[in-house]
């Protein structure tokens, strides 16, 4: 399977040339020194990488957010946290494997960590429902948030989902109600909450575990009310217009921060998180610890008041322009 994106083709071509040169040097019986040529190619690869990744379009950023080798929630739980003990079930219907959650440690701080989990292959994607949670997934998350609240444990949520599952079964079991209850209950929890978008942050499926005192986002992730493909299908009547929709939706981290929808952008290694999973795990850990320390110094009464104000401030409209449109 091709594991590089179309816009990365110039880098791949240079890397292929370098590999061919290396093989030629190793197999050549006559000693010919190609080191100078190899150095030049390596320099060109580095220049090309910086050029490409410093000028990514919103659509290209979204492609990186969906990269098949990008670290998922369980990858971060294993590398960023310690002593993770997974807990299962919503105690009402079943255990949704699209949501993983449990007790863990962030350094020496005990926390409750949870997030949406995608699969690496077809079998795992079926098990994880492609990272799209059912109602029981959100009810499991809320059950464990309340458990964390009971034991005064900070909550950390990891978001990576195209959205909540829109199937018949999810509707029968009241997916909208499950998300709505989470929004209400998370707003009044008496513990600090940090949410981090590591890949896709799709609509209510992301917001169902996204009410937090600090909302962080990785550099090549996105957070949106609708996917670019869905927006293109509605407004352009053509899913092929997804790149235009991605530009219009303003869903990249820089736009989100300017709109005060997220609090902090976490830098990724050049080329995306999948190019150096260990580095991004360490970076994420530093940002989580920093924000958690700041929240722990704040009285919980103020944390809850600020949390409420934060989300009440989302979304604006101009009454004057609205009146003009009506006349």
Image (cartoon, helix red, strand yellow):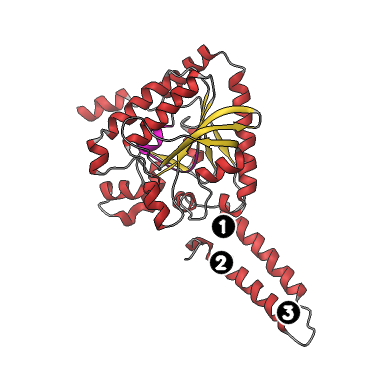
Taking depth in this image into account, of 105 and 275 the one nearest to the observer is 105
Magenta stretch encompasses residue 8: no
Circle 3 Cα neighbour tier, 10 Å, few/some/many (<14 / 14–19 / ≥20): few
Which of the two labelled residues, at mark 1 and mark 3, occupies the earlier sequence position? 3
Answer left or right for 326 relative to 272: left
- Residue 60: horizontal and vertical position, in percent? 47, 53
Q: Which residue is mark 3?
A: 26
Residue 205 lies in the magenta-colored region: yes
Q: Is residue 322 visible?
A: yes
Sort mark 1 into few (<14), some (14-19) or many (20+) by Cα contacts within 10 Å. Answer: some
Q: CA distance from mark 2 to mark 1?
A: 9 Å
Which disc, if any, is residue 279? none
Q: Secondary structure at mark 2?
A: helix
**Which of the two labelled residues, at mark 3 and mark 2, occupies the earlier sequence position?**
2
Element carrying mark 1: helix
Residue at the limit of the structure toward the left, as seen here: 327
Q: Are marks 2 and 1 in contact (CB under 8 Å)?
A: yes
Q: Residue at x 36, y 40 (%)?
A: 133
Which contiguous range is marked in magenta? Answer: 197-209
Give above or below for 257 relative to 148.
Answer: below
Q: Which mark is residue 10?
A: 2
* 304 relative to 1, above or below: above
Q: Tell me how far mark 3 sits from mark 2, CA to CA.
A: 25 Å
Q: Which residue is mark 1?
A: 52
> Foreground mark, 3 or 2?
3
The Cα–Cα distance between marks 1 and 3, rounded to whole angstroms, is 31 Å
Image coordinates for residue 127, horizontal then vertical, percent: 39, 49
Q: Which image quadrant: the C terminus?
A: top left
The secondary element bearing badge 3 is classed as: helix
Tell me, yes or no, if residue 195 can be seen here.
no
């Amino acid at each position: 399977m091709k594991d590089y994106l179309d816009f990365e083709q110039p880098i791949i071509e240079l890397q292929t040339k370098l590999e061919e040169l290396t093989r030629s040097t190793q197999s050549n019986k006559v000693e010919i020194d190609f080191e100078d040529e190899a150095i030049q190619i390596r320099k060109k690869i580095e220049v090309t990488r910086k050029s490409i990744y410093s000028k990514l379009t919103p659509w290209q950023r979204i492609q990186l957010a969906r990269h098949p080798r990008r670290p998922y929630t369980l990858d971060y739980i294993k590398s960023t946290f310690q002593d993770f003990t997974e807990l299962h079930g919503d105690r009402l219907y079943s255990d949704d494997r699209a949501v993983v959650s449990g007790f863990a440690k962030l350094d020496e701080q005990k926390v409750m960590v949870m997030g949406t989990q995608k699969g690496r292959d077809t079998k795992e994607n079926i098990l994880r429902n492609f990272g799209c949670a059912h109602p029981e997934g959100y009810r499991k998350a809320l059950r464990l948030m309340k458990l964390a609240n009971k034991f005064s444990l900070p909550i950390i949520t990891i978001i990576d989902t195209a959205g909540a599952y829109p199937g018949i079964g999810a509707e029968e079991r009241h997916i909208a109600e499950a998300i709505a209850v989470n929004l209400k209950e998370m707003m009044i929890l008496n513990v600090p909450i940090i949410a981090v978008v590591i890949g896709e942050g799709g609509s209510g499926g992301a917001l169902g575990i996204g009410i937090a005192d600090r909302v962080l986002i990785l550099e090549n992730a996105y957070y949106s009310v609708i996917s670019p493909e869905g927006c293109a299908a509605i407004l352009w009547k053509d899913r092929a217009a997804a790149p235009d929709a991605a530009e219009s939706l303003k869903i990249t981290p820089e736009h989100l921060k300017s709109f005060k929808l997220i609090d902090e952008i976490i830098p990724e290694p050049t080329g995306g998180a999948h190019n150096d999973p260990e580095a991004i795990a360490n970076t994420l850990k530093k940002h989580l610890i920093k924000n958690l320390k700041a929240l722990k110094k704040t009285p919980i009464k103020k944390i809850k008041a600020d949390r409420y104000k934060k989300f009440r401030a989302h979304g604006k409209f101009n009454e004057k322009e609205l009146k003009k449109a009506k006349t």
